[in-house]
Image (cartoon, helix red, strand yellow):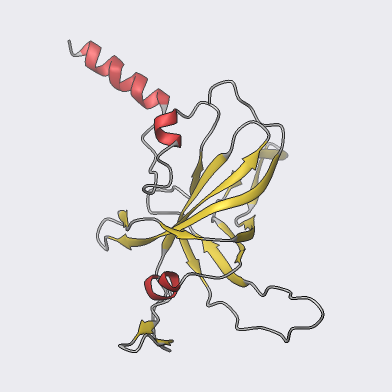
Amino acid sequence: MANSKNKVKYGLRDVYYAKAAFDDDTGDVTYDELVHIPSAVSLSLDPEGENEPWYADNGIFIVLGSNQGYTGSIEVALLPESFYIDILHEEKDSNGVMAEVSDAEIEHFALTFRFEGDKHKVLHVLYNCTCSRPAMESSTVEDSKEPQTDTLDLTVSPLANGYVKAKTSESTPDSVYNSWFTQVYEPQGTAEDETAEEDTENANG
Protein backbone atom coordinates (compact mmCIF):
# COMPACT_ATOMS: atom_id res chain seq x y z
CA MET A 1 0.00 0.00 0.00
CA ALA A 2 3.02 2.32 0.15
CA ASN A 3 2.90 5.46 -2.05
CA SER A 4 -0.80 4.88 -2.75
CA LYS A 5 -2.58 8.03 -1.62
CA ASN A 6 -6.30 8.61 -2.00
CA LYS A 7 -7.63 11.82 -3.50
CA VAL A 8 -11.25 11.07 -2.63
CA LYS A 9 -13.26 8.76 -0.38
CA TYR A 10 -16.69 7.29 -0.91
CA GLY A 11 -18.78 4.29 -0.04
CA LEU A 12 -19.22 2.21 3.11
CA ARG A 13 -18.96 -1.55 3.40
CA ASP A 14 -17.63 -4.43 5.51
CA VAL A 15 -19.15 -3.35 8.81
CA TYR A 16 -18.38 -5.70 11.71
CA TYR A 17 -18.99 -5.54 15.45
CA ALA A 18 -17.21 -7.24 18.37
CA LYS A 19 -18.56 -7.28 21.91
CA ALA A 20 -16.21 -5.65 24.42
CA ALA A 21 -15.46 -6.78 27.99
CA PHE A 22 -13.78 -4.44 30.48
CA ASP A 23 -11.61 -5.24 33.50
CA ASP A 24 -13.14 -3.28 36.38
CA ASP A 25 -9.77 -2.80 38.09
CA THR A 26 -7.53 -1.82 35.19
CA GLY A 27 -9.97 -0.65 32.53
CA ASP A 28 -8.31 -3.00 30.02
CA VAL A 29 -10.59 -4.25 27.27
CA THR A 30 -10.84 -7.56 25.42
CA TYR A 31 -13.01 -8.25 22.40
CA ASP A 32 -15.02 -11.21 21.15
CA GLU A 33 -14.79 -12.32 17.53
CA LEU A 34 -15.87 -9.87 14.85
CA VAL A 35 -19.36 -10.47 13.45
CA HIS A 36 -20.49 -9.13 10.09
CA ILE A 37 -23.35 -6.61 9.80
CA PRO A 38 -24.37 -6.90 6.13
CA SER A 39 -25.93 -4.23 3.91
CA ALA A 40 -24.43 -1.07 5.38
CA VAL A 41 -26.20 2.07 4.13
CA SER A 42 -24.59 5.05 5.86
CA LEU A 43 -22.45 6.12 8.82
CA SER A 44 -22.33 9.63 10.25
CA LEU A 45 -20.31 10.65 13.32
CA ASP A 46 -19.70 14.11 14.79
CA PRO A 47 -16.78 14.82 17.15
CA GLU A 48 -17.53 15.55 20.81
CA GLY A 49 -15.36 17.87 22.90
CA GLU A 50 -14.37 21.51 22.88
CA ASN A 51 -11.28 23.63 22.33
CA GLU A 52 -10.84 26.06 25.22
CA PRO A 53 -8.49 29.03 24.84
CA TRP A 54 -6.25 29.87 27.82
CA TYR A 55 -5.15 33.48 28.01
CA ALA A 56 -1.85 35.01 29.12
CA ASP A 57 0.12 38.14 28.17
CA ASN A 58 -3.08 39.77 26.91
CA GLY A 59 -3.74 37.06 24.32
CA ILE A 60 -4.44 33.41 23.67
CA PHE A 61 -1.44 31.58 25.10
CA ILE A 62 -2.58 28.02 24.39
CA VAL A 63 -5.70 26.21 23.22
CA LEU A 64 -6.64 23.20 25.35
CA GLY A 65 -8.45 20.52 23.40
CA SER A 66 -10.84 17.94 24.82
CA ASN A 67 -11.54 14.74 22.85
CA GLN A 68 -14.72 13.12 24.14
CA GLY A 69 -15.19 10.79 21.19
CA TYR A 70 -18.07 10.94 18.72
CA THR A 71 -21.85 10.75 18.50
CA GLY A 72 -23.89 9.91 15.45
CA SER A 73 -25.64 7.01 13.77
CA ILE A 74 -25.22 4.03 11.50
CA GLU A 75 -27.90 2.83 9.10
CA VAL A 76 -28.08 -0.73 7.78
CA ALA A 77 -30.64 -2.64 5.74
CA LEU A 78 -31.31 -5.10 8.57
CA LEU A 79 -29.50 -5.77 11.83
CA PRO A 80 -28.50 -9.43 12.22
CA GLU A 81 -30.18 -11.48 14.91
CA SER A 82 -26.81 -11.97 16.62
CA PHE A 83 -26.56 -8.22 17.31
CA TYR A 84 -29.87 -8.26 19.16
CA ILE A 85 -28.62 -11.15 21.29
CA ASP A 86 -24.97 -10.15 21.82
CA ILE A 87 -25.32 -6.38 22.25
CA LEU A 88 -28.98 -5.58 23.03
CA HIS A 89 -29.41 -8.72 25.17
CA GLU A 90 -32.67 -9.87 23.68
CA GLU A 91 -33.57 -13.46 24.62
CA LYS A 92 -34.31 -16.24 22.16
CA ASP A 93 -36.55 -18.97 23.54
CA SER A 94 -36.85 -22.66 22.63
CA ASN A 95 -39.36 -21.81 19.88
CA GLY A 96 -36.97 -19.37 18.22
CA VAL A 97 -38.93 -16.33 19.39
CA MET A 98 -36.94 -13.19 20.24
CA ALA A 99 -38.01 -11.32 23.38
CA GLU A 100 -36.90 -7.83 24.38
CA VAL A 101 -36.18 -7.41 28.10
CA SER A 102 -36.82 -4.07 29.80
CA ASP A 103 -33.89 -4.16 32.25
CA ALA A 104 -31.28 -5.54 29.82
CA GLU A 105 -27.96 -3.66 29.88
CA ILE A 106 -26.72 -2.82 26.40
CA GLU A 107 -23.16 -4.03 25.82
CA HIS A 108 -20.19 -1.97 24.67
CA PHE A 109 -18.67 -3.04 21.36
CA ALA A 110 -16.04 -2.21 18.76
CA LEU A 111 -17.12 -1.35 15.25
CA THR A 112 -14.94 -1.89 12.18
CA PHE A 113 -15.70 -0.80 8.63
CA ARG A 114 -14.23 0.13 5.25
CA PHE A 115 -14.38 3.40 3.30
CA GLU A 116 -13.71 3.12 -0.42
CA GLY A 117 -11.16 5.37 -2.14
CA ASP A 118 -9.77 6.01 -5.59
CA LYS A 119 -6.43 4.31 -4.76
CA HIS A 120 -7.03 2.09 -1.75
CA LYS A 121 -9.72 1.32 0.78
CA VAL A 122 -9.23 2.79 4.26
CA LEU A 123 -10.11 0.47 7.14
CA HIS A 124 -11.40 1.89 10.41
CA VAL A 125 -12.11 0.71 13.95
CA LEU A 126 -14.05 2.46 16.72
CA TYR A 127 -13.00 0.96 20.03
CA ASN A 128 -15.74 1.75 22.53
CA CYS A 129 -19.26 2.06 21.12
CA THR A 130 -22.65 2.03 22.75
CA CYS A 131 -25.96 2.33 20.94
CA SER A 132 -29.65 2.92 21.30
CA ARG A 133 -32.32 0.36 20.50
CA PRO A 134 -33.40 0.66 16.85
CA ALA A 135 -36.83 2.10 16.10
CA MET A 136 -39.64 -0.15 14.84
CA GLU A 137 -41.07 1.04 11.56
CA SER A 138 -42.44 -0.24 8.29
CA SER A 139 -45.05 0.85 5.76
CA THR A 140 -47.50 -0.57 3.26
CA VAL A 141 -46.34 -1.48 -0.22
CA GLU A 142 -47.50 0.97 -2.89
CA ASP A 143 -46.50 1.18 -6.57
CA SER A 144 -42.88 0.39 -5.70
CA LYS A 145 -41.22 -1.29 -2.74
CA GLU A 146 -39.18 1.05 -0.56
CA PRO A 147 -36.88 -0.89 1.81
CA GLN A 148 -37.08 0.05 5.48
CA THR A 149 -33.77 0.26 7.32
CA ASP A 150 -32.48 -0.11 10.87
CA THR A 151 -30.71 2.89 12.40
CA LEU A 152 -28.63 2.87 15.58
CA ASP A 153 -27.72 6.03 17.45
CA LEU A 154 -24.03 5.61 18.36
CA THR A 155 -21.87 7.02 21.14
CA VAL A 156 -18.13 6.43 20.74
CA SER A 157 -16.18 7.02 23.96
CA PRO A 158 -12.43 6.99 24.70
CA LEU A 159 -10.98 3.85 26.29
CA ALA A 160 -9.15 4.05 29.61
CA ASN A 161 -5.86 4.20 27.66
CA GLY A 162 -7.15 7.19 25.67
CA TYR A 163 -7.68 5.48 22.32
CA VAL A 164 -10.89 6.39 20.47
CA LYS A 165 -10.42 5.03 16.95
CA ALA A 166 -7.79 3.89 14.45
CA LYS A 167 -7.51 3.64 10.67
CA THR A 168 -5.08 2.29 8.12
CA SER A 169 -2.81 4.53 6.05
CA GLU A 170 -0.82 4.20 2.83
CA SER A 171 2.12 2.85 4.88
CA THR A 172 0.14 0.11 6.63
CA PRO A 173 1.75 -3.28 5.80
CA ASP A 174 -0.32 -5.85 3.91
CA SER A 175 -0.14 -8.27 6.84
CA VAL A 176 -2.09 -5.82 9.01
CA TYR A 177 -4.39 -4.62 6.24
CA ASN A 178 -5.39 -8.11 5.11
CA SER A 179 -6.18 -9.31 8.65
CA TRP A 180 -8.18 -6.24 9.71
CA PHE A 181 -11.50 -8.07 9.90
CA THR A 182 -10.21 -11.19 11.66
CA GLN A 183 -9.89 -9.48 15.06
CA VAL A 184 -10.06 -5.98 16.51
CA TYR A 185 -6.78 -4.22 15.77
CA GLU A 186 -5.08 -2.61 18.77
CA PRO A 187 -2.28 0.00 18.39
CA GLN A 188 1.24 -1.40 18.73
CA GLY A 189 3.18 1.73 19.72
CA THR A 190 4.70 4.45 17.53
CA ALA A 191 7.83 4.40 15.42
CA GLU A 192 9.37 6.80 17.94
CA ASP A 193 8.68 4.29 20.73
CA GLU A 194 10.48 1.56 18.79
CA THR A 195 13.45 3.84 18.11
CA ALA A 196 13.70 4.79 21.79
CA GLU A 197 13.54 1.11 22.79
CA GLU A 198 16.32 0.23 20.34
CA ASP A 199 18.47 3.11 21.64
CA THR A 200 17.97 1.85 25.20
CA GLU A 201 18.94 -1.71 24.24
CA ASN A 202 22.04 -0.47 22.43
CA ALA A 203 23.05 1.70 25.40
CA ASN A 204 22.72 -1.27 27.73
CA GLY A 205 24.97 -3.30 25.45
Above or below, comparing residue 41 to residue 133 in the picture: above
Q: Is residue 62 visible?
A: no
Q: Residue at x 58, y 52 (%)?
A: 13
Side of 204 where 106 appears, left or right = right
Q: Residue at x 60, y 80 (%)?
A: 135
Above or below, comparing residue 154 to residue 63 in the picture: below
Above or below, comparing residue 40 to residue 60 in the picture: below
Q: Residue at x 48, y 69 (%)?
A: 80
Q: Is residue 57 visible?
A: yes
Above or below, comparing residue 5 to residue 25 in the picture: above
Dividing the picture into quadrants, the one containing residue 117 is: top right
Percent position of residue 107, x then y: 39, 70
Side of 96 where 115 appears, left or right = right
Percent position of residue 47, x then y: 62, 54
Percent position of residue 175, x then y: 39, 31
Q: Residue at x 40, y 87 (%)?
A: 97
